[in-house]
Image (cartoon, rainbow, N blue to C red):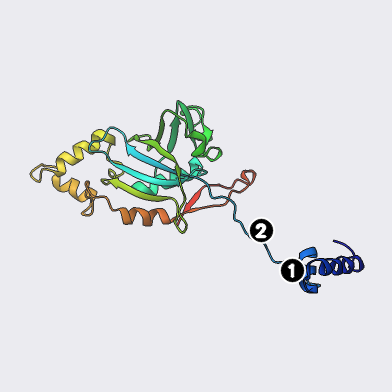
Amino acid sequence: MPKDKDLKKLVRARMAKTGEGYSTARLRLAGPTVSRGALPQSTSTDLEAPPAPAIYQVRIALSDIAPAIWRRLLVPADTSLAQLHHIIQAAFGWWDYHLHQYIVDERYFGDPDPAFADELPPMTDEREASLRDIAGAKEIVYEYDFGDCWRHIIDIESVAVAPEAGMRYPACTGGARSRPPEDCGGVSGYEELLQVLADPRHEEYASMKTWVGKKFAPERFDLAATNRALQKVRREPRRSRSKGEDRGLIIH
Protein backbone atom coordinates (compact mmCIF):
# COMPACT_ATOMS: atom_id res chain seq x y z
CA MET A 1 0.00 0.00 0.00
CA PRO A 2 1.35 3.53 -0.76
CA LYS A 3 2.48 5.74 2.10
CA ASP A 4 -0.25 7.99 3.47
CA LYS A 5 1.13 11.13 1.73
CA ASP A 6 1.40 9.40 -1.64
CA LEU A 7 -2.00 7.80 -1.17
CA LYS A 8 -3.63 11.19 -0.71
CA LYS A 9 -2.16 12.38 -3.99
CA LEU A 10 -3.46 9.29 -5.76
CA VAL A 11 -6.90 9.74 -4.21
CA ARG A 12 -7.11 13.39 -5.33
CA ALA A 13 -6.01 12.42 -8.84
CA ARG A 14 -8.73 9.78 -9.00
CA MET A 15 -11.32 12.26 -7.69
CA ALA A 16 -10.42 14.69 -10.45
CA LYS A 17 -10.64 11.97 -13.08
CA THR A 18 -13.81 10.15 -11.93
CA GLY A 19 -15.73 12.74 -9.95
CA GLU A 20 -15.88 10.35 -6.97
CA GLY A 21 -15.91 11.61 -3.40
CA TYR A 22 -12.84 11.26 -1.22
CA SER A 23 -14.07 8.21 0.71
CA THR A 24 -15.12 6.37 -2.43
CA ALA A 25 -11.91 7.13 -4.28
CA ARG A 26 -9.79 6.04 -1.30
CA LEU A 27 -11.78 2.82 -0.90
CA ARG A 28 -11.27 2.00 -4.59
CA LEU A 29 -7.52 2.49 -4.28
CA ALA A 30 -6.67 1.13 -0.85
CA GLY A 31 -9.61 -1.00 0.27
CA PRO A 32 -11.46 -0.60 3.57
CA THR A 33 -9.68 1.13 6.41
CA VAL A 34 -8.89 -1.06 9.40
CA SER A 35 -8.61 0.80 12.66
CA ARG A 36 -5.64 0.15 14.91
CA GLY A 37 -6.20 -2.91 17.06
CA ALA A 38 -9.14 -4.09 14.99
CA LEU A 39 -9.10 -7.46 13.24
CA PRO A 40 -9.84 -7.65 9.53
CA GLN A 41 -13.07 -9.38 8.70
CA SER A 42 -12.75 -12.92 7.43
CA THR A 43 -13.64 -13.49 3.83
CA SER A 44 -15.86 -16.35 2.71
CA THR A 45 -12.71 -18.16 1.60
CA ASP A 46 -11.26 -17.89 5.11
CA LEU A 47 -14.38 -19.49 6.56
CA GLU A 48 -14.58 -22.42 4.17
CA ALA A 49 -14.51 -25.72 6.01
CA PRO A 50 -12.25 -28.50 4.77
CA PRO A 51 -14.04 -30.73 2.27
CA ALA A 52 -16.06 -33.50 3.88
CA PRO A 53 -14.87 -37.05 3.17
CA ALA A 54 -16.72 -39.02 0.54
CA ILE A 55 -19.49 -41.28 1.77
CA TYR A 56 -19.50 -44.93 0.75
CA GLN A 57 -22.66 -47.01 0.51
CA VAL A 58 -21.86 -50.43 1.90
CA ARG A 59 -23.98 -53.57 2.08
CA ILE A 60 -22.92 -56.11 4.69
CA ALA A 61 -24.50 -59.56 4.82
CA LEU A 62 -23.86 -62.68 6.87
CA SER A 63 -22.55 -65.47 4.68
CA ASP A 64 -24.34 -68.80 4.09
CA ILE A 65 -27.63 -67.76 5.69
CA ALA A 66 -30.93 -67.59 3.82
CA PRO A 67 -33.04 -65.51 3.85
CA ALA A 68 -30.17 -63.04 4.09
CA ILE A 69 -29.33 -61.12 7.24
CA TRP A 70 -27.98 -57.80 5.98
CA ARG A 71 -27.50 -54.08 6.64
CA ARG A 72 -26.95 -51.22 4.20
CA LEU A 73 -24.76 -48.48 5.68
CA LEU A 74 -23.48 -45.04 4.73
CA VAL A 75 -19.92 -44.73 6.02
CA PRO A 76 -17.24 -42.03 5.53
CA ALA A 77 -14.51 -43.21 3.17
CA ASP A 78 -11.76 -42.36 5.66
CA THR A 79 -13.20 -44.71 8.30
CA SER A 80 -10.44 -47.03 9.49
CA LEU A 81 -11.03 -50.76 9.60
CA ALA A 82 -10.75 -50.51 13.38
CA GLN A 83 -13.59 -48.00 13.34
CA LEU A 84 -15.56 -50.12 10.89
CA HIS A 85 -15.37 -53.02 13.34
CA HIS A 86 -17.35 -51.01 15.91
CA ILE A 87 -19.80 -49.87 13.24
CA ILE A 88 -20.55 -53.44 12.16
CA GLN A 89 -20.94 -54.56 15.75
CA ALA A 90 -23.47 -51.80 16.39
CA ALA A 91 -25.35 -52.28 13.13
CA PHE A 92 -25.90 -55.99 13.72
CA GLY A 93 -26.24 -55.83 17.48
CA TRP A 94 -23.29 -58.08 18.27
CA TRP A 95 -21.82 -57.87 21.77
CA ASP A 96 -18.14 -57.62 20.77
CA TYR A 97 -17.27 -60.52 23.06
CA HIS A 98 -14.99 -62.32 20.61
CA LEU A 99 -12.00 -61.81 18.34
CA HIS A 100 -12.40 -60.52 14.82
CA GLN A 101 -10.42 -60.03 11.62
CA TYR A 102 -10.78 -58.84 8.03
CA ILE A 103 -9.80 -60.93 5.03
CA VAL A 104 -9.28 -58.67 2.02
CA ASP A 105 -8.20 -60.58 -1.09
CA GLU A 106 -6.30 -63.07 1.11
CA ARG A 107 -4.68 -60.29 3.13
CA TYR A 108 -5.50 -60.16 6.84
CA PHE A 109 -6.27 -57.07 8.93
CA GLY A 110 -7.07 -56.98 12.61
CA ASP A 111 -5.89 -56.12 16.08
CA PRO A 112 -2.56 -57.95 16.32
CA ASP A 113 -2.16 -59.80 19.61
CA PRO A 114 1.22 -61.38 20.39
CA ALA A 115 -0.56 -64.05 22.42
CA PHE A 116 -2.11 -65.43 19.22
CA ALA A 117 0.78 -64.74 16.85
CA ASP A 118 1.48 -68.45 16.38
CA GLU A 119 -2.15 -69.36 15.74
CA LEU A 120 -3.21 -66.64 13.29
CA PRO A 121 -1.85 -65.66 9.86
CA PRO A 122 0.36 -62.56 9.52
CA MET A 123 -1.88 -59.59 10.19
CA THR A 124 -1.79 -55.88 9.28
CA ASP A 125 -2.95 -53.49 11.98
CA GLU A 126 -6.55 -52.54 11.15
CA ARG A 127 -5.91 -48.99 12.37
CA GLU A 128 -3.51 -48.45 9.49
CA ALA A 129 -6.05 -49.08 6.70
CA SER A 130 -9.23 -47.24 5.78
CA LEU A 131 -12.36 -48.21 3.91
CA ARG A 132 -11.04 -46.17 0.98
CA ASP A 133 -7.85 -48.25 0.95
CA ILE A 134 -9.72 -51.50 0.33
CA ALA A 135 -12.43 -50.17 -2.00
CA GLY A 136 -10.92 -51.87 -5.04
CA ALA A 137 -10.70 -55.33 -3.48
CA LYS A 138 -12.45 -58.26 -5.12
CA GLU A 139 -13.60 -59.73 -1.81
CA ILE A 140 -13.88 -58.17 1.64
CA VAL A 141 -14.83 -60.37 4.57
CA TYR A 142 -15.26 -59.34 8.20
CA GLU A 143 -15.09 -62.39 10.45
CA TYR A 144 -16.38 -62.26 14.02
CA ASP A 145 -15.97 -65.01 16.63
CA PHE A 146 -13.45 -67.55 15.41
CA GLY A 147 -15.46 -70.33 17.05
CA ASP A 148 -18.87 -69.66 15.50
CA CYS A 149 -17.15 -68.02 12.50
CA TRP A 150 -19.66 -65.37 11.52
CA ARG A 151 -18.45 -64.23 8.10
CA HIS A 152 -19.82 -60.86 6.96
CA ILE A 153 -19.47 -60.18 3.24
CA ILE A 154 -18.81 -56.47 2.68
CA ASP A 155 -19.92 -55.10 -0.69
CA ILE A 156 -19.03 -51.46 -1.43
CA GLU A 157 -21.98 -50.54 -3.65
CA SER A 158 -21.10 -46.88 -4.25
CA VAL A 159 -18.15 -44.60 -3.59
CA ALA A 160 -19.92 -41.44 -4.73
CA VAL A 161 -22.65 -40.73 -2.17
CA ALA A 162 -22.83 -36.98 -1.57
CA PRO A 163 -22.74 -36.12 2.16
CA GLU A 164 -25.91 -34.37 3.30
CA ALA A 165 -25.81 -31.31 5.54
CA GLY A 166 -26.91 -32.20 9.05
CA MET A 167 -26.69 -35.93 8.41
CA ARG A 168 -24.83 -37.96 11.01
CA TYR A 169 -22.59 -40.74 9.77
CA PRO A 170 -22.37 -43.69 9.93
CA ALA A 171 -26.04 -44.34 9.20
CA CYS A 172 -28.14 -47.34 8.27
CA THR A 173 -30.62 -47.05 5.39
CA GLY A 174 -31.96 -50.60 5.28
CA GLY A 175 -31.60 -54.16 6.40
CA ALA A 176 -33.33 -57.45 7.08
CA ARG A 177 -33.68 -59.90 9.95
CA SER A 178 -32.06 -60.08 13.38
CA ARG A 179 -28.56 -61.42 13.73
CA PRO A 180 -28.16 -64.89 15.28
CA PRO A 181 -27.76 -65.19 19.06
CA GLU A 182 -24.18 -65.04 20.29
CA ASP A 183 -22.54 -68.45 20.86
CA CYS A 184 -25.30 -70.43 19.14
CA GLY A 185 -22.84 -72.61 17.22
CA GLY A 186 -22.34 -70.83 13.92
CA VAL A 187 -24.50 -71.23 10.83
CA SER A 188 -25.36 -74.89 11.45
CA GLY A 189 -26.16 -74.24 15.10
CA TYR A 190 -28.33 -71.28 14.14
CA GLU A 191 -30.28 -73.32 11.60
CA GLU A 192 -30.88 -76.04 14.19
CA LEU A 193 -31.98 -73.40 16.71
CA LEU A 194 -34.56 -72.03 14.27
CA GLN A 195 -35.90 -75.54 13.64
CA VAL A 196 -36.37 -76.09 17.37
CA LEU A 197 -38.07 -72.73 17.90
CA ALA A 198 -40.44 -73.44 15.03
CA ASP A 199 -41.74 -76.57 16.75
CA PRO A 200 -43.25 -76.01 20.22
CA ARG A 201 -43.51 -79.80 20.60
CA HIS A 202 -39.76 -80.28 20.24
CA GLU A 203 -38.17 -81.67 23.40
CA GLU A 204 -35.65 -78.80 23.49
CA TYR A 205 -38.15 -76.05 22.70
CA ALA A 206 -38.62 -74.81 26.28
CA SER A 207 -34.91 -74.72 27.10
CA MET A 208 -34.00 -73.03 23.79
CA LYS A 209 -36.80 -70.49 24.19
CA THR A 210 -35.50 -69.63 27.64
CA TRP A 211 -31.92 -69.40 26.37
CA VAL A 212 -32.61 -66.98 23.50
CA GLY A 213 -35.03 -64.90 25.57
CA LYS A 214 -38.54 -63.65 24.87
CA LYS A 215 -37.34 -60.70 22.77
CA PHE A 216 -35.56 -62.81 20.15
CA ALA A 217 -37.42 -62.56 16.84
CA PRO A 218 -35.34 -63.84 13.90
CA GLU A 219 -37.39 -62.02 11.23
CA ARG A 220 -37.39 -58.63 12.94
CA PHE A 221 -35.29 -55.68 11.80
CA ASP A 222 -35.66 -52.30 13.51
CA LEU A 223 -34.13 -49.50 11.41
CA ALA A 224 -34.66 -46.82 14.05
CA ALA A 225 -33.04 -48.93 16.77
CA THR A 226 -30.11 -49.71 14.48
CA ASN A 227 -29.48 -46.02 13.86
CA ARG A 228 -29.72 -45.28 17.57
CA ALA A 229 -27.01 -47.87 18.13
CA LEU A 230 -24.87 -46.30 15.40
CA GLN A 231 -25.27 -42.86 16.96
CA LYS A 232 -23.58 -44.22 20.07
CA VAL A 233 -20.53 -44.97 18.00
CA ARG A 234 -18.49 -41.78 18.11
CA ARG A 235 -15.51 -41.04 15.92
CA GLU A 236 -12.37 -40.44 17.95
CA PRO A 237 -9.62 -38.08 16.71
CA ARG A 238 -6.48 -39.76 15.47
CA ARG A 239 -3.83 -39.89 18.13
CA SER A 240 -0.25 -41.01 18.30
CA ARG A 241 0.03 -44.75 18.34
CA SER A 242 3.43 -44.46 20.02
CA LYS A 243 1.61 -43.70 23.26
CA GLY A 244 -0.35 -46.91 23.00
CA GLU A 245 -3.64 -45.17 22.33
CA ASP A 246 -6.33 -46.52 20.08
CA ARG A 247 -7.46 -44.50 17.08
CA GLY A 248 -10.80 -46.11 16.56
CA LEU A 249 -14.35 -45.51 17.73
CA ILE A 250 -15.71 -45.72 21.21
CA ILE A 251 -19.18 -46.83 22.14
CA HIS A 252 -21.08 -45.02 24.85
Q: Position of residue 4 (x, y in %)?
A: 89, 68
Tell which circle, 1 or 2, labels the residue nearer the N-terminal end.
Answer: 1
Note whether 67 is above or below 237 in the view shown. above
Quadrant in which residue 188 is drawn: top left
**Mark seen at residue 46:** 2
Residue at 18% of width from left, 49% of height from top?
209
Determine the secondary structure under disc 2. Answer: loop
Task: Give the position of the C terminus as an image quadrant.
Answer: bottom left
Q: Position of residue 170 (x, y in %)?
A: 43, 50
Residue at 44% of width from left, 35% of height from top?
101
**Mark seen at residue 150:** none
- Residue 96 seen from this side: no
Q: Amino acid at mark 1?
A: Leu
Q: Position of residue 185 (x, y in %)?
A: 28, 37
Determine the secondary structure under disc 1. Answer: loop
Of residues 134 and 5, the one drawn nearer to the viewer in this rendering: 5
Q: Is residue 55 left or right of residue 34?
A: left
Q: Is residue 101 left or right of residue 7?
A: left
Note whether 245 is above or below 1 in the view shown. above
Residue topped by disc 1: 39
- Residue 185 seen from this side: yes
